[in-house]
Image: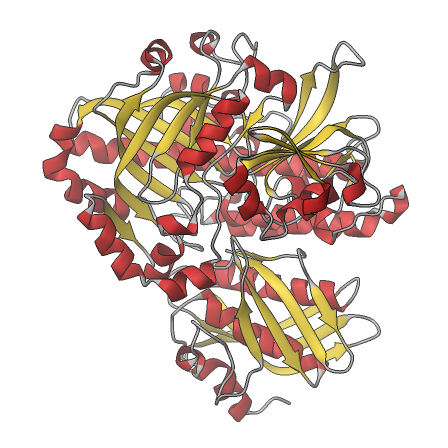
């Protein structure tokens, strides 16, 4: 792959169409030298090339600077497909459909939280179930699950789990109306029944943070971010339900691709025309799983607010924004060859970042651009960015989603045990509460890229603007 | 029929397997964990096609959780029938079936009998479910990414697991 890479500028690389037979567009990778060296060590660039082979792809097969090997698309992969001639692929969304991040802001100061931080973290840990397969004590009924899949966070708010005002600060106002629960299999529903309101495991987490530095004061003020104030970040997705939807439709599409004359270089990239029956069914199921994820994050927020209200009565946790980083959405974008076109934008481990003035933004963020929430690894900083006009034009209003892994879980466990990681973080003033010490060692900071580098690339590329940096105080993991 | 000594080998000795390096029991390498940037994977070698599925299940449960299982916690009889596009697809479906049973039945599957039809890419097995401690598990799905299933000169499976 390396011989087909050409550096455009300090943070952009072009992967030429000669890299692989069948590429319809080049690749465009956002990376500095070190990030590119890391990307060359696994299969990520081959996956960028594979995506470029899919029918109807427009402009480029993109990869954000948190790029690493995924299934089908690389993590950090972005690709847009013509609605008439293009495809939709579960491999471009991911197993954890609508995995995403939300950030809650407060006026609680760090000095106020320090004396109670350990108790607060323990309370959060016991109030929010975590771990793969973790379950809530009361299962949903089938009827309620149906409502969740139809209505997402709106369902949760109607049940008293949050304010109506929260919905303004969730993508699509908390509900993907295109959801079709009938397209979700019984197996997927059964997996989801007992998992709503749970965190999950792996790289999912809750984090109590402090605003460490403000880069852009006026936007930060609009977002409610103030240096020294406490924030809480939530990272989770659609749990077993989303995973099952992905698995179901990979098998459906693998069996129906031939009918549409589609061949893919990687079975995980199986796809069908966007407007085919199978494509529409997948979208209906994907949006249903997305609604499950939005409801999930809303319920977890409700529980966080309950815990905080016990420690800090009368103090709010306000929702700054909720973003998803594993989704495919039909969007309107401008092209050189036409005034605008509707395309199906796949973002796999990449975040939508709407530019200032975009009509889908809540009024309060029309001038700042969309908040983008970028978690670092456990123990490192997270960032709040804003969407930019350049990103809106260049890469379908997309940006990075996190730090991106550089070390396998197997190697991470071998290198350091979870207890030692926890102790090291404690020495740095970071409390870790975790279901599994294996997960703690797998998720240690050195297993990930340096998030500072990822953010720097994004900012230099002009596809995201730094607003604030957040430092972790307590991490709760599954 | 699969006998008790097989069952003991597969399920009672899971905790004794050195998960940090390789799998296998009594020093014999039947499976090992392999590197993946974000998740994990397994490679399985066997002389019989059925053993690919049995050993991959062993690997799956070893990686899924640190819990130990008691075969006395038997819940109910259970049968699994799967048909794949090919043997690789069948293997992914098999492991995903185990994920499904773990999450929805809180159980591991212990087979008494298994038959794999090479030509039809079909699997039929019956056995029973054993309750597991409700402590969650790591694996969320078996994937098709990087999937390899070879049948000659030995049976070989490589599959990556979403964690």
Along the line of sight, which residue is nearer the eye, A135 or A132? Answer: A132
Q: Position of residue A315 (x, y in %)?
A: 19, 22
Q: Quadrant of the N terminus of chain B?
A: bottom right
Q: Looking at the image, is B6 positioned above or below residue A141?
A: below
State the image coordinates of residue A29 (x, y, percent, origin top left): 62, 34
Q: Is residue B145 left or right of residue A401?
A: right
| Residue A316 shows in this picture | no
Height in image: A435 above or below A264? below
Residue drawn at x 13%, y 36% is A114
Q: Residue at x 49, y 71 (%)?
A: B61
The image position of residue A259, as x and y in percent, is 89, 45
Residue A473 location, quadrant: top left
Residue A1 appears at what percent x and percent y?
Answer: 70, 47
**Vertical order, A33 against B138 (above or below):** above
Visible residue check, residue A343: yes
The relative height of residue A414 versus residue A355 in the rendered view (above or below) is below
Residue A271 as seen in the image, left or right of residue A425: right
């Amino acid at each position: 792959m390396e011989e087909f890479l050409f550096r455009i500028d300090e943070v952009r690389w072009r992967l030429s169409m000669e890299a692989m037979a069948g590429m319809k567009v080049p690749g465009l990778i956002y990376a500095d030298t070190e990030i590119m060296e890391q990307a060359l060590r696994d299969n990520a660039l081959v996956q960028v090339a594979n995506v470029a082979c899919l029918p109807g792809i427009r402009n480029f097969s993109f990869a954000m600077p948190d790029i690493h090997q995924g299934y089908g698309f690389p993590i950090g992969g972005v690709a847009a497909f013509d609605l008439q001639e293009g495809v939709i692929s579960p491999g471009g969304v991911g197993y954890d459909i609508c995995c995403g991040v939300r950030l809650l802001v407060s006026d609680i100061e760090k000095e106020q939280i320090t004396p109670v931080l350990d108790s607060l973290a323990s309370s959060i840990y016991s109030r929010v179930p975590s771990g793969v397969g973790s379950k809530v004590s009361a299962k949903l009924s089938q009827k309620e699950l149906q409502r969740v899949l139809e209505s997402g966070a709106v369902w949760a708010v109607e049940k008293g789990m949050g304010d109506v005002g929260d919905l303004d600060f969730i993508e699509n106002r908390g509900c993907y109306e295109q959801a079709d629960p009938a397209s979700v299999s019984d197996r997927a529903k059964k997996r989801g029944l007992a998992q709503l309101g749970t965190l999950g495991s792996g790289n999912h987490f809750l984090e109590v943070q402090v605003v460490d530095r403000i880069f852009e004061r006026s936007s930060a003020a609009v977002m409610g971010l103030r240096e020294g104030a406490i924030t809480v970040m939530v990272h989770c997705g659609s749990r077993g339900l989303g995973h099952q939807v992905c698995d179901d439709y990979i098998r459906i599409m693998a069996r129906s691709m031939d009918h549409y004359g589609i061949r893919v270089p990687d079975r995980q990239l199986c796809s069908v025309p966007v407007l085919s029956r199978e494509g529409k069914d997948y979208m209906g199921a994907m949006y249903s799983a997305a609604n499950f994820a939005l409801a999930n994050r809303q319920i977890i927020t409700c529980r966080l607010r309950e815990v905080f209200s016990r420690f800090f009565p009368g103090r709010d946790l306000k929702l700054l924004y909720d973003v998803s980083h594993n989704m495919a959405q039909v969007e309107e974008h401008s092209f050189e060859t036409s005034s605008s076109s509707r395309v199906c934008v796949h973002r796999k481990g990449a975040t939508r970042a709407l530019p200032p003035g975009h009509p889908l933004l809540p009024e309060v963020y029309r001038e700042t651009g969309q908040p983008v929430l970028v978690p670092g690894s456990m123990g490192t900083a997270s960032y709040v960015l804003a969407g930019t006009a350049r990103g809106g034009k260049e890469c379908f209003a997309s940006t990075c989603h996190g730090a991106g892994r550089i070390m396998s879980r197997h190697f991470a466990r071998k290198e350091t045990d979870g207890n030692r990681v926890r102790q090291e973080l404690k020495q740095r003033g970071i409390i870790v509460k975790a279901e599994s010490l294996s997960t703690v060692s797998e998720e240690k900071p050195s297993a990930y890229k340096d998030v500072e580098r990822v953010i720097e690339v994004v900012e230099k590329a002009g596809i995201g603007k730094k607003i604030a940096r957040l430092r972790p105080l307590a991490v709760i993991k599954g | 029929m699969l006998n008790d000594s097989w069952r003991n080998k597969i399920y009672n000795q899971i905790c004794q397997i050195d998960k940090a390096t390789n799998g296998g029991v009594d020093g014999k390498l039947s499976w090992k964990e392999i590197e993946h940037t974000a998740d994990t994977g397994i490679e399985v070698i066997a002389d019989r096609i059925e053993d690919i599925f049995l050993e991959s299940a062993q690997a799956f449960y070893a990686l899924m959780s640190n819990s130990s299982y008691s075969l006395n916690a038997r819940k109910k009889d259970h049968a699994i029938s799967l048909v794949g596009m090919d043997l690789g697809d069948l293997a992914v479906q098999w492991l995903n079936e185990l994920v499904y049973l773990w999450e929805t039945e809180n159980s591991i599957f212990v087979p008494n009998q298994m038959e794999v039809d090479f030509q039809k890419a079909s699997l039929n097995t019956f056995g029973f479910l054993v309750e597991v401690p409700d402590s969650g598990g790591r694996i969320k799905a078996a994937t098709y990414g990087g999937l390899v299933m070879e049948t000659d000169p030995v049976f070989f499976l490589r599959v990556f697991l979403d964690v």
